[in-house]
Amino acid sequence: MTTFQLITIPLLACAVIVTAVAISRRRLAPRVGVMWLALWSAALVSIAFPELLVRIAHVLGIGRGADLVLYVSILFTLGGFFLIYLRFRRLDEALTQIVRHLAIRDADEPPGDDHAP
Amino acid sequence: MDTYIVVPAYNEAAAIRRVVEELRAGFPRVIVVDDGSSDSTSSEARRAGATVLRHVLNRGQGAALQTGIEYSVRHGADVVVTFDADGQHRTEDVTRLIDALDETGADIAIGSRFLGLRSNVPTIRRFTLRLGALFMRVTSGVALTDAHNGLRAIRRRAAEQIYLTIDGMAHASEIIDQINRLELKVTEVPVVIHYSEYSVAKGQSSLAAFRIAFDYLMKRIFR
């Protein structure tokens, strides 16, 4: 076993356990929790059994396991950015609605005909 | 007939007073939506006799317009007119727009700087705006000669239905898209846009068209 494996495998195992506990105590929404669980487990398996990763890479037509990891992580990162972008838009809309609500609530006296020049 | 003039303004202290005074000579109900200005836009507008609504944060022209439209509808406006704060529009054109609503029975009248009357439109801007109108024709199917004019008159029943969700400058495209979707009847009216040094400096860069198109398309896709 390499030094890298000696360091990362226990860490990832801890991450799996912590996540599982968080899900069971309802600290994490089940859907989000399962996603993290899958991510940690995938990392754990591919570090513990690198030859498995290489075989999956070959099946997909990619030469090296490390390349597969690189491509997949880039895709996930882009997807993450996109989700954050969508969330930002929702926040922006909510913020505008609050600002509008305040503006209308605290408006000047409505204009009447007596204001006419 | 109750006409409310909605003027979205962001840091327009230098121009807003004259704009409001001129409007008030013909229309008593002028609503200035101060979009989080850091200058004295609000007090200048009040001094000129406008009703001021203030956004505590800058949210963009589309957001300010929607605030003003909502307020006007709530207070019983029969017609809501949108009018830019930088002095590029003429008060007499407001009357022309409202007359056009009556004559044509349209729900909304939009000013066009490319119909008959001559505006001193800079060449690059002319090109960008024409391209913008073509873009709107393709994406929403509404054929206008000037799709991005800030001067509009909207009948109450249309103002009640229109809801601008794009905070930034792409709201002009969004209005047209909603005209199409709500099947509102639209008419174009020749107006004059006055390109002063001030209004050009305060206005959009022509390159902003790309950003505006992006905002608009993202909204259409992820509504």
Image: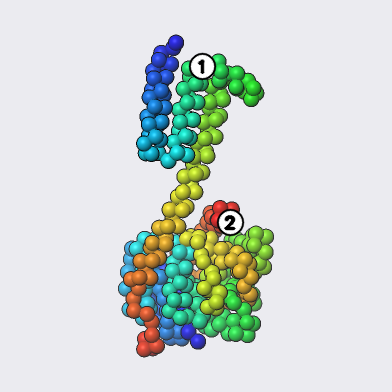
Q: Are marks 2 and 1 on the same chain?
A: no
- Asked whether residue B147 is in view, the answer is no
Q: B159 left or right of A94?
A: right
Residue situated furthest top in the rendering:
A1
What amino acid does circle 2 point to? Arg
What label sits on residue B220 in the rendered view?
2
Q: Residue at x 49, y 49 (%)?
A: A86
Q: Badge 2: how crowded within 10 Å, few (<14), some, or many (20+)?
A: few
Residue appearing at x 59%, y 53% in the figure: B221
Horizontal side, residue A117 vs residue B154: left or right: left
Point out which mark residue A31 bears: none
Q: How is the image coloured?
A: rainbow
The C terminus of chain B - image quarter: bottom right
Query: Could you say which is closer to the camera, residue B211 or residue A44?
Result: A44
- Relative vertical location of residue B160 with respect to residue B208 in this rendering, above or below: below
* Residue of label 1: A49
| Residue nearest the viewer, comparing B8 with A43 | A43
* Picture coordinates of residue B171, whole percent (x, y): 52, 63
Amino acid found under the numbered disc labelled 1: Phe
The residue lying at 44 percent from left, 12 percent from top is: A2
Q: In which chain is the residue bearing label 1?
A: A
Q: Secondary structure at mark 1?
A: loop
Task: Estimate the x, y position of residue A68 in percent, counting from the top left.
Answer: 56, 25
CB under 8 Å between discs 2 and 1: no
Decide: few, some or many residues near mark 1? Use Cα within 10 Å; few <14, some 14-19, many ≥20: few
Mark 2 vs mark 1: give the one in front: 1
Secondary element under disc 2, as helix, strand or loop, is helix
Q: Which residue reaches farthest front?
A: A24
Q: Residue at x 40, y 65 (%)?
A: A100
